Amino acid sequence: MAWIVGAGVLIGLLAVVWGISTLRTGWLPPTARRQATRPRLHGLGVLLTGTSLLLQGAFHFGTEPGAYWEVRFFSGNALLLSGLLLIALSQLPLRRRQDDADPSES
């Protein structure tokens, strides 16, 4: 069981590094470049998702102070779902502002 959680922690570390590099530089890996229209929002989502995986692994191995299992469960899932929501929002197409509209259309 520990190797499964360890694999999750490794994926969490990779996600945190990916999120930080995206937030700092705006760089996205080639697999995510086509879908993401807002790189900073995508980086924040990946960072939250990775943090969730790291915290759940830390709670499993007992490196964090004891908290009720409900608090750990719901806080980890809230971080994970909010990160996935931000990733999904980063893939929505950009809206055009009314100021940028073509004047000949009026």
Image: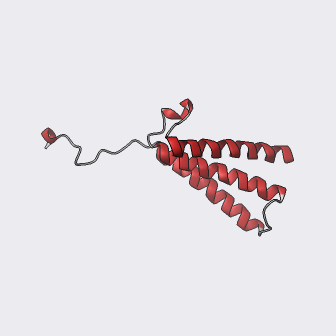
**Residue at screen point 83% across, 60% down:** 62
User: Residue 12 or 4: which is nearer the viewer?
Assistant: 12
Image height check: is 89 above or below 66? above
User: Residue 18 or 92: which is nearer the viewer?
Assistant: 18
Horizontal and vertical percent position of residue 87: 53, 46
Horizontal and vertical percent position of residue 48: 60, 52
User: Residue 95 or 22: which is nearer the viewer?
Assistant: 22
Q: Is 89 placed left or right of 64 in the picture?
A: left
Q: Is 39 placed left or right of 19 in the picture?
A: left
Horizontal and vertical percent position of residue 30: 54, 30
In the displayed image of the protein, which residue is found farthest to the top?
30
Q: Quadrant of the C terminus?
A: top left
Q: Is residue 51 visible?
A: yes
User: Residue 75 or 51: which is nearer the viewer?
Assistant: 51
Image height check: is 77 above or below 102? below
**Residue at screen point 72% across, 61% down:** 73
Q: Is residue 1 visible?
A: no
**Residue at screen point 15% across, 41% down:** 103
Q: How many marks?
A: 0
Horizontal and vertical percent position of residue 69: 77, 66
